[in-house]
């Protein structure tokens, strides 16, 4: 390798900082980003005995921040990093992936990965600069919201400072608190912001230095030029650059697959179509090295919204005004909350109120669909843990405050609220995907979007490796396609590349294993074949499965919200569709076979030994 | 007969407007509607060839053989079903 990834182990309790390097064997095995984080997460959690004994807010819970192997280079869309810990929201593997400019700055400041342990005595922040790390007092920063905190760090350390910060929800241990960089880029899933807050850590500021050394500069530049040209000719890249992800709302809504009023309904108003955003959008923005430019800058003071936010802070809670949705989007981003979780949790609470399962004595007043003012106030109450907001700040764990049947209406898997607004009862592969996703209900671990393309049989066979049933509403062969998606998305996350340029996410073209091999070779000198690179993806999935097994998860946890099994979709094309329990178990069987796991979903012992034989080097 | 057509993203960009009113012969089917659209808006030929639209009449997805009726509302939707990656 040209350069060895630099790892910093920071103990906030003792103040000790150890700067070391990641063993090359581990880089070959996991690349970086999500994969490498998982290797360190498993090792660190097991170092103290039984990982179940480490509460997510225990100082021994590591907060791992890792850039992708290609992040910060000129490889297309290589901006991303992962944040990993035991999740305070789900209690299992916690992992969030984020874009923006922070990860490139972190690498250019000299660090590929931070393993943060312990708890600072007083609110603090980290400054990364010239290969050195300083722990500095966060006086004057603690209590600030996201944009203000980042602006203040620029005042202290210069305009070129790029930071990842938490807002009041992270400080207040709200279990769906995000770590944010820029106005909107969020390491949102799983409450990583609360883990950071539990360590009394307000921010990580990076002052970028030199560019990142690569193995073959000219070759990497040539790949960039070619791949950028190819990507810009792709229709999906062109459309995302004009409309962004909000284009998906109209598609899902017309089909009858938009989560509406906590999935009691499956379609909503046309007033949330993408064209309504154009009234509030003045520019499309990008992350480091991006060729897509998918993020709206809105005229109400923020960035976004994305499709997920439109769905979950719109249709899912009955709000039909785009202006109100954008205002709520800006609010949750500036507070530092996961829009997916908070939209799901508020929708859940609204249905509980509608059904009389909770009342004014708990909520403090009516909680009605579409009541914008109440929602706005409730989001702030969650962030500051006031009144009923203090209960909902517990996310899915708020179920303990409600009657037992409240869980029947919770749209979550493994205690993580579903990330995206797509009602998965129609496309069965989508349903299997969120059921088995390693961090809980989430579309970004394996979403088989090619299912809706009606691709020719031979093309599908070529992509997935064998002939497969083209019916997206059937149950057959879904294990095959989810395992395929698992692997390539794990590789993408480990390289630090955005899924919007990854083959399989909205296009059968874009960048696949072959192109990734070329990029890795030019950037690092490491040699992979498409087969050995996919094997990295498999190793990441196996490691994640082992982490969750340590927390006691079994086949029974690979399931879906009760509503998806028992309640048929009420209208439009999807009417009548639900998930058949027996067929679902058949899909699971097939999926485990594809993954090489046993019938109970366990990783074979020899594979476990192989993974444990890798030297982590802490 | 009179047919209302809604062109979702990105198809409308080849036409310049999102909603169209079209006059079709009695007995026309969805395939006939697509032919008329191709003739009037040649840029749509490339769009529809690259990514054949999902066609809805009212609330149901239909095939090219589906007959249309006067006053029908046709919705042409891009085949896509991904998600956001920004707020991950």
Image: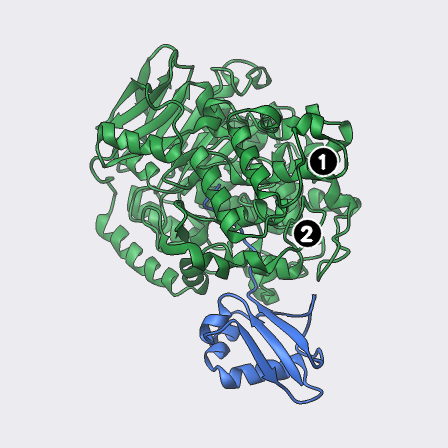
Alpha carbon distance from label 1 to label 2? 30 Å
| Position of residue B19 measured from the top left corner of the image (x, y, whole percent) | 55, 73
Q: Is residue A496 left or right of residue A539?
A: left
The residue mark sitting in front, 1 or 2, is 1
Q: Nearer the viewer, residue A617 or A340?
A: A340
| Chain coloured green in the rendered structure | A
Vertical comparison of A528 with A284: above or below = above
| Position of residue A289 measured from the top left corner of the image (x, y, whole percent) | 31, 49
CB within 8 Å, label 1 to label 2: no
Q: Element under label 1? A: helix
Give me the disc on residue A353: 1
Quadrant in the picture for the C terminus of chain A: top left
**In the figure, residue A594 lies in which quadrant?**
top right
Give me the disc on residue A317: none
Kindly identify which residue carries mark 2. A428
For marks 1 and 2, the one nearer the N-term is 1
Q: Please state the chain letter of the residue tagged with numbered disc 2 in the rendered image.
A: A
Q: Element under label 2? A: helix
Q: Residue at x 41, y 63 (%)?
A: A238
Vertical comparison of A248 with A399: above or below = below
Instruction: Name the tint of chain B in the rendering.
Output: blue
Quadrant in the picture for the N terminus of chain A: top left
Q: Nearer the viewer, residue A545 or B20?
A: B20
| Position of residue A58 measured from the top left corner of the image (x, y, whole percent) | 51, 15
**Residue A494 is at least partly visible in this image:** yes
**Residue A507 is at least partly visible in this image:** no
**In the figure, residue B31 lies in which quadrant?**
bottom right
Q: Is residue A26 left or right of residue B61?
A: left
Q: Residue at x 36, y 39 (%)?
A: A182
Q: Please state the chain letter of the residue tagged with numbered disc 1 in the rendered image.
A: A
Q: Residue at x 42, y 24 (%)?
A: A616
Q: Is residue A54 left or right of residue A364?
A: left
């Amino acid at each position: 390798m040209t350069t060895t990834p630099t790892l910093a182990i920071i103990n906030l309790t003792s103040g000790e900082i150890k700067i070391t390097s990641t063993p090359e064997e581990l880089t070959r095995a996991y690349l970086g980003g999500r994969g490498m984080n998982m290797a360190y997460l498993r090792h660190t959690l097991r170092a103290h005995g039984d990982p179940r004994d480490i509460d997510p807010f225990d100082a021994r819970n590591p907060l791992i921040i890792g850039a992708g192997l290609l992040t910060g280079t000129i490889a297309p869309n290589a901006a991303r990093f992962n944040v990993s810990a035991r999740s305070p929201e789900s209690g299992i593997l916690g992992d969030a992936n984020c874009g923006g400019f922070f990860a490139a700055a972190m690498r250019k400041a000299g660090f590929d990965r931070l393993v943060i342990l312990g708890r600072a005595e007083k609110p603090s922040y980290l400054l990364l600069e010239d290969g050195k790390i300083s722990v500095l007092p966060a006086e004057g920063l603690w209590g600030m919201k996201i944009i203000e905190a980042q602006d203040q760090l620029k005042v202290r350390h210069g305009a070129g400072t790029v930071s990842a910060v938490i807002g009041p929800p992270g400080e207040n241990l709200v279990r769906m608190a995000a770590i944010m960089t820029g106005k909107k880029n969020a390491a949102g899933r799983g409450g990583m912001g609360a883990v950071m807050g539990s360590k009394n850590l307000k921010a990580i500021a990076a002052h970028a230095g030199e560019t990142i050394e690569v193995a073959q500069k000219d070759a990497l530049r040539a790949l960039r030029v070619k791949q950028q040209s190819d990507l810009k000719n792709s229709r999906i890249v062109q459309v995302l650059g004009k409309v962004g992800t909000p284009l998906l709302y109209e598609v899902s809504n017309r089909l009858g697959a938009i989560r509406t009023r906590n999935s009691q309904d499956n379609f909503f108003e046309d007033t949330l179509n993408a064209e309504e955003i154009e009234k509030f959008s003045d520019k499309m923005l990008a992350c480091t090295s991006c060729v897509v430019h998918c993020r709206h800058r809105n005229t109400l003071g923020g960035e976004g919204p994305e499709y997920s936010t439109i769905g979950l802070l719109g249709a899912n809670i009955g709000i039909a005004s785009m202006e109100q949705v954008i205002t709520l989007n800006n609010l949750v981003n500036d507070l530092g909350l996961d829009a997916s979780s908070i939209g799901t949790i508020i929708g859940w609470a609204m249905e509980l109120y509608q059904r009389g399962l909770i009342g004014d004595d708990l909520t403090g007043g009516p909680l009605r669909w579409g009541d914008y003012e109440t929602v706005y106030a409730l989001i702030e109450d969650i962030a500051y843990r006031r009144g009923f907001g203090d209960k909902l700040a517990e996310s899915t764990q708020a179920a303990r405050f409600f009657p037992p049947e409240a869980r029947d209406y919770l749209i979550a898997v493994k205690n993580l609220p579903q990330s995206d607004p797509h009602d998965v009862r129609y496309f069965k592969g989508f349903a299997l995907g969120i059921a088995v996703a390693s961090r809980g209900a989430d579309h970004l671990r394996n979403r088989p979007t090619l299912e809706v393309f009606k691709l020719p049989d031979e093309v599908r066979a070529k992509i997935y490796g064998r002939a497969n049933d083209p019916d997206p509403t059937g149950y057959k062969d879904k294990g095959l396609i989810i395992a395929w998606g698992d692997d390539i998305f794990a590789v993408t996350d480990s390289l630090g590349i955005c899924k919007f340029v990854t083959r399989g996410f909205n296009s059968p073209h874009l960048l696949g294993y072959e192109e990734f091999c070329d990029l890795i070779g030019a950037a690092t000198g490491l040699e992979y074949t498409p087969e050995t690179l996919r094997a990295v993806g498999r190793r990441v999935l196996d490691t994640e499965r082992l982490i969750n097994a340590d927390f006691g998860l079994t086949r029974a946890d690979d399931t879906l919200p009760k509503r998806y099994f028992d309640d048929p979709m009420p209208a439009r094309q999807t009417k009548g569709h639900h998930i058949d329990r027996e067929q679902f178990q058949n899909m699971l069987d097939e999926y485990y076979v594809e993954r090489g796991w046993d019938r109970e979903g366990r990783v074979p012992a020899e594979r476990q030994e192989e993974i444990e034989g890798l030297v982590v080097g802490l | 007969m009179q047919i209302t057509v809604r062109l979702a993203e990105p198809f409308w960009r080849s036409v310049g407007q999102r909603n169209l009113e079209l006059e079709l012969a009695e007995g026309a089917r969805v395939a006939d509607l697509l032919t008329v659209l191709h003739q009037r808006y040649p840029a749509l030929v490339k769009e529809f060839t690259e990514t054949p639209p999902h066609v809805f009449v009212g609330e149901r997805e239909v095939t090219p053989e589906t007959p249309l009726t006067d006053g029908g509302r046709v919705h042409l939707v891009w085949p896509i079903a991904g998600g956001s990656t920004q707020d991950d």
